[in-house]
Image (cartoon, helix red, strand yellow):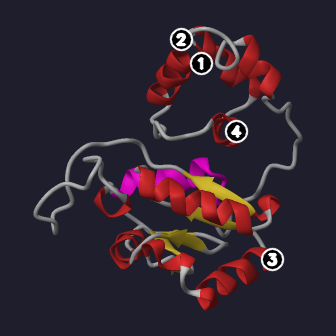
Amino acid sequence: MQRLKIACPVIVEGKYDKIKLSSVIEAQIITTDGFGIFRHAEKAALIRRLSEAGPIIVLTDSDGAGFVIRNHLKGVLPQDQVKHAYIPDIYGKERRKATAGKEGKLGVEGMRPEVLKEALLRAGATVVGEEMSSQPRRQITRSDLFTAQLTGCAGSQERRKKLLHQLDLPEHLSTKALLQVLNQLMSYEEYTKVIQTL
């Protein structure tokens, strides 16, 4: 598979994630060193400077630890400069490990290259040499989620789980993050078609 040339830096958790991702894309890849991002001020400052200079993509594992790191980055980076790429919940263990992780899910390093490529493209990664569409489109809103019974009513949590599963998104996605991801992934018209299948 030919590597994608991505125009912005991609943030991942660890060195094995970086190794795997570098086989899929040509881009600046920065690691958080797992929870090291909480202790290493220099690394946090570098990521902050990169995000101030232009868009960055955050790609963490879909387990609880990955979401702790992602949420930390959400809190310290300018939101208009951050794109979030999500990998699906796939159970198994990475080849180099003796046992599966705590939640039994594969991380970035265990994903097939096509899955990583798709996750980055769905997040809105700009591929060098490709034209970007400048046509504005109707955004999916919180009100749309409420109307579709995905929030604020009996059974909405179960409906959200079905939607996350259907779209190959991780179960730890908050409602706010789900809204951001839906707007990255699809148009309002595509969203309404998906909702009709729930």
Amino acid type, mark 4: Lys
Of labels 4 and 3, earlier in sequence is: 3
Q: Are marks 2 and 1 in contact (CB under 8 Å)?
A: yes
Mark 1 element type: helix
Q: Which residue is mark 1?
A: 194
Disc 3 from disc 2: Cα separation: 39 Å
Question: Residue tagged by mark 2?
Answer: 198
Tell me the number on the disc at residue 176.
4
Given this view, does label 4 or label 2 mark the residue nearer the observer?
A: 4
Res 14 quadrant in image: bottom left
Label 2, secondary structure: give it.
Answer: loop
Q: Residue at x 49, y 69 (%)?
A: 12
Q: Is residue 126 visible?
A: no
The picture places residue 89, in percent across and down from the top left corner, at 37, 41
Q: Nearer the viewer, mark 1 or mark 3?
A: 3
Q: Is residue 196 left or right of residue 102?
A: right
Look at 50% across and 30% down and name the residue there: 164
Mark 2–mark 1 distance (CA, rounded to whole Å)? 7 Å
Query: If you read the primary sequence from the N terminus, does the residue marked by circle 4 or circle 1 appear first?
Result: 4
Answer above or below: position of 143 versus 103.
Answer: above
The residue lying at 66 percent from left, 86 percent from top is 46
Q: Is residue 115 magenta?
A: yes
Magenta span has 72? no
Q: Which residue is mark 3?
A: 52
